[in-house]
Image: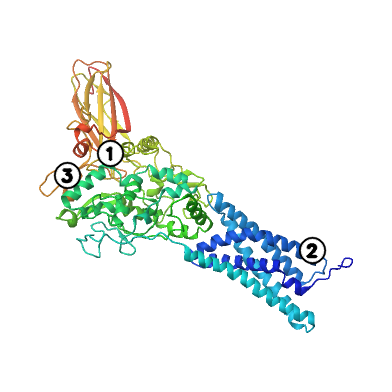
Amino acid sequence: MTGTTTTVSRAGEWKHVLLIVVAGLLLFETLTGLLIWLLPFSVTNQINVIMHTLIGLVFLVPFAWYQMRHWLIYRQTKLNHYKLTGYFSLAATLLAIVSGLVLTYQATFATRISYAWDLIHIVSTFALIASVVPHLVTIVARNLKGRQLETINVRKSEKRFAWGSALVTGSLFAVVALAVYAYEPVVFNNEFPADYETPWGEDRPFAPSLAQTSTGGAFDSRSLGGSESCGSSGCHEEILKEWQVSAHRYSAMDVAFQKVQSIMGEQNGPESTRYCGGCHDPISLFSGTKNIFTEELTNLTGYDEGVSCIACHAIKETDVKGNAAYTMTQPDRYMFELSEGSAAKRVSDFLIKAYPRHHVETLQHRLFKSPEFCAACHKQFIDEEINNVGWVQLQNQYDNWRESRWNHPGDAAQTIECRECHMPLTESLDPASGDPIDYNRSPGDKKHRSHRFLAANQFMPLVLDLPGAQEHVELTEKWLRGEIEIPEISHKWQLGPAVPIELVMPDTAAPGERITIQAVITNNKPGHDFPTGPIDIIQSWVEIAVTDQSGNVVYESGTRDDRHYIEPGSFVFKVEPVDQYDNLIDRHNLWELVGVRYRRSLFPGMQDRAEFTFSVPASVTGDLEVNAKLLYRKVNQNLLDILFGEESGVTAPISLLSVSTGSINLSPMGTR
């Protein structure tokens, strides 16, 4: 160096080890970044993500060292196209580094990566290519023209640079290849047990359920389980907590289901329980557990998770015929996702967040935003394969809704769909919050749909003693009373109880007069029959009490005895199904059902009237107080006594859905 002029050995610079290392690392980062962006999900690409992240961090030190050294050497040269493209490449590299560091931090410590930073990272990569390539090409092209000894030496150094950089890059890709070879994925046993029976044909291995897999074969139970990991990663904690106490989660561990399934297996053959498994116990169904030589008809994973996260989100096709008419896929899992150990868990969580494309594409789709998705299970029938007689329609929430006042095809602003009621929006920090598809939502609304699936089961969470059961039951009770406001649809329906009761009665009556009181029940909010579900076991009834001014009971109906049975003659919403010999189906033995001898329920928007006629005692004076309640319980006492024994003391809690009160003035003139 003389004065302010630096003498630079161009040949020495080209073969400098620091430049070769930086160029090799940069080339590896660029190529792996492109591969991650362009190639489909695979073990190789996941290792590319890991190596891209690690080498990106390693790259920082030599890059900063080289750039400072390079700038100090060439800072005083005049501005030309070589120097200009160099500055552009420096800016693009710095932007890629900053965005990469942000993404690495988010994938490690946050719940999701920012798609804005991800886009910046991708764009900066292409900007880097667009600036580095002309920077190098123009310099090399310049050196090709010279014939002096120095130029010849420079060209030799350029070749050494090229080979050295390629060696660094190639060595890193060799590490990738070695890691791919060394990785031992969890191997799924997608085979039916050797003794698996298919009485309805080998082409229908899950019959009489209409559920099927995308391959037509079995799925390892592990591939559809692991719901806890969705929350333990720090991502979907809120949704997991909601699901853990929901009816979807306990659909298989439901003690009544387990009892009925056991009886069905004994009486109708274990294979017949597949009919129930498509909706109640899909993990056990698809793993081949519901088989003649299986001691337990529900495996451990299926029992604990019921309708798991994967079992719901991996459905890719449904049919509105019901009876679990859906097609289940088996998503490729991320590396170490099913491996044991905290280190494996941290790596898989990082991969899911750093490389979320596969996670989103396989588990998030428009189908489960539609009522048709719900129809696969929330519509049920019995046919000859089950009862040996013929077809009988059972619960059918989907067609109830489709034909109801809440369905306005093509007009989302007027329609109320299943998820809008049973999965209301809730304030959320979950990475799944926001939705650009719904007509009234946005990607940044910071809300997700509740996975509690609040409906009408206030019994099973307490029986199973699930975490958060008491809170869930209280919310269910409020839901049944219509006390949970749903802002997104509050303008579409009448506020108040879901199923209100209203008294119609005379204002006055005379002692000794015979009078009639009516209780009018309206199916106000539900988008399906009330009650709905397996209403051979559900009961909803009117309890009415008429008292005098001293509190003495003048008339009552709908009371329960010491055994928790509703008194005969009460007004009850229920169904009485029968078998082919006209015997009552009272054990939920649907495999014997051929028809219905009595049915009382309310279609959406419709009313029914309960009439109570009695004579006012001649000795009563003053006003009569009338109190009418609409009550509900999930399981009738008779079935509980059959399943568990009357001595067990098991009884279902009773919920107050709505109440109406009034008074009748007694006067000698009465109503005349």
Tell me the kind of residue under disc 1: Lys
Look at the image and tell me in which quarter the N terminus lies. bottom right
Q: Tell me what residue is drawn at x 23 percent, y 19 percent.
A: 669
Q: Is residue 57 visible?
A: yes
Instruction: Say which element carries label 2.
Output: helix
Q: Tell me what residue is drawn at x 76 percent, y 75 percent.
A: 11
Task: Identify the residue position indicated by label 3 in the image.
Answer: 585
What's the mark number on residue 72? 2
Crowding around mark 1 (Cα neighbors within 10 Å: few <14, some 14 to 19, many 20+) is: many
Q: Position of residue 66 (x, y in %)?
A: 72, 63
Furthest residue in direction right, as rendered: 3
In depth, the one of 134 and 193 nearer the eye is 193
Q: Point out the tag, 2 or 3, that comes first from the N-terminus.
A: 2
Q: Tell me what residue is drawn at x 20 percent, y 50 percent.
A: 265
Give the CA separation, mark 1 to mark 2.
79 Å
Callouts 2 and 3 close, C-beta under 8 Å? no
Tell me the kind of residue under disc 2: Leu
Tell me the kind of residue under disc 3: Ile
Q: Position of residue 593 (x, y in %)?
A: 17, 49
Q: Point out the tag, 1 or 2, that comes first from the N-terminus.
A: 2
Give the CA separation, mark 1 to mark 3.
17 Å
Give the CA separation, mark 2 to mark 3.
90 Å
Image quadrant where residue 193 sits: bottom left
The relative height of residue 161 versus residue 547 in the rendered view (above or below) is below
What's the mark number on residue 634? 1
Q: Position of residue 583 (x, y in %)?
A: 12, 44
In depth, the one of 190 and 580 nearer the eye is 190
Callouts 1 and 2 close, C-beta under 8 Å? no
Instruction: Say which element carries label 3.
Output: loop
Q: Nearer the viewer, mark 1 or mark 2?
A: 2
Q: Point out the tag, 1 or 3, that comes first from the N-terminus.
A: 3
